[in-house]
Image: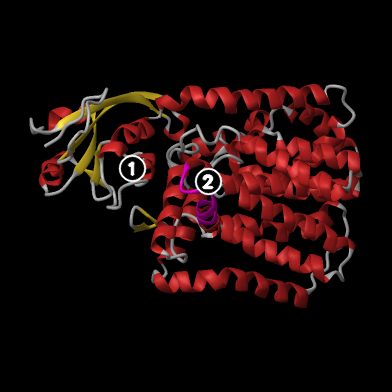
Amino acid sequence: MGKPLYLALFFLGAVLLYSIGNWSLPLIDRDEPRFAEASREMRQSGDFLIPRLNGDYRFDKPPLIYWCQVLSYDVLGENDFAARFPSAVFAALAAVVTLIFASRLGGPRIGVWSGIIFATSLQVFIHARAAVADMPLVFFFLTATWADWERIRNPKSTFWWWTFYLSLGLGFLSKGPPALLPILFAPFLSILNRAPFRLKFRSALLGALVVLTVIGLWGIPALIATNGAYLKIGIGKHVLQRSLQPMESHGGAGLGGYFLFLPFYLVVSFFSFFPWCVFLPACVKRLFTHREPEENYLLGPILIVLFVFTLIQTKLPHYVLPAYPMLSILVARQAAESRWRQGLLGIALALYLLIALVGFRMIEPEFLSKRIAKTALPVISAATRTASLNYDEQSLIWYLRAKTRPFHRRLNSSAFSDFMNQSGPALCVVNKDSISQIQLNPDWKTFEVSGHNFARWKVKPVQWFAIRMALPIPQPLDLVTVVK
């Protein structure tokens, strides 16, 4: 079998692994629906410069993931599967690049197992099917890392020079400043190898211009259009603030919490790197006793990523995903010599397929927003105004706006009556605990939906009423519905 065909089959196999079950698993609050809905609104408005969510600017991330999701919608339609498909593709591409890079470092056997280990790590399996920006970042971070290694071996190569700096720029458009960390790898390697580092100032200056050009082609118009708000919020809040204090309860509060969470990534790696975490102790022991020069280079990205994100206050397990390709290559040396490697691979694949084919379908009925939408969408029109009272999950907007065009509103109890009594069809989702705070018109019909709130992976049982008005019901529904 030719190498290109082999790599193509490996890529397609990885895409299949990451895509199975994505049609049944609803988007999980809160990040996935935010990305998915912002991309849909970008597609609807035709404004590909500034992402918007529910009609308002969304400055959280640069635009590359939104562009990719828009393209996916054009091909596959606006649905959960299409929103996740770009992540599956970028993860599969990263697995292929890991295989090729590792083959250059340690030969074909190490290359194959490096690609397999990366592709089947638990955190990769999770984020390869998540409609968020992490997998594009991982891919461009990896191509920059590989290109930098090739540039060290062949400093006169223009191909790898361009690959390195274009990857930095495209990585920044994926998820911002973390994509620029590869500029530190060559100096760090000189420290590990106790060799002098010589900065080629002219080359670095030209490279910086390439990176700034890639970023600036989008960034300058975006800053002008938003009067600098994109920089202030995108960098100020979502980079600097995350570094200085935990956001959305991701990390320990205060100085004591900060020190308590310092070993966070060392601990979670034994879960995130499942099942290959069993080889981590032996790999660490080997690297302490003896390292090849190439292994020193691989250690650079791992240690720098761990160091940077350990210092940052906000912590989530997937923040260190950019280091996983290099970690996979180092661990592959242990795995390739183990008699347990094929058994571990079989267990991982069987578990992942069981989760995707059975687990996702089992938990699908428990997702509130999708259940509400399934009941409401058949009997509402595109002109229906929608709102919610004390139910703020983004997935409700994503599923309702599959049909409706007005932007969703979040109400307090005092605004409920005004919203419902305006002319035209309306629907409001109300937390059952808030029913006592509002007055229901006896001419309205209601339907009740119960399930679990999976926001931030916290499973919380809740019940809701969805209330709508001014819509005739063509036939009785299993759930009680209200009509004016």
Marking on residue 82: 2
Which secondary structure is most common in the magenta stretch? helix
Query: Residue at label 1?
Result: 400
Q: Is residue 217 left or right of residue 9?
A: left
Q: Residues within 10 Å of mark 1 (few under 14, many from 20)?
A: many
Q: Amino acid at mark 2?
A: Ala
Q: Amino acid at mark 1?
A: Leu
Which stretch did the figure color magenta? Answer: 70-79
Q: Nearer the viewer, residue 421 or 331?
A: 421
Residue drawn 42% across the image and 65% down it: 46
Q: Is residue 76 magenta?
A: yes
Distance, label 2 to label 1, CA atoms, is 17 Å
Q: Is residue 323 magenta?
A: no
Residue 428 point in image, percent of width and height: 22, 39
Secondary structure of the residue carrying numbered label 2: helix
> In what quadrant of the picture does the C terminus appear?
top left
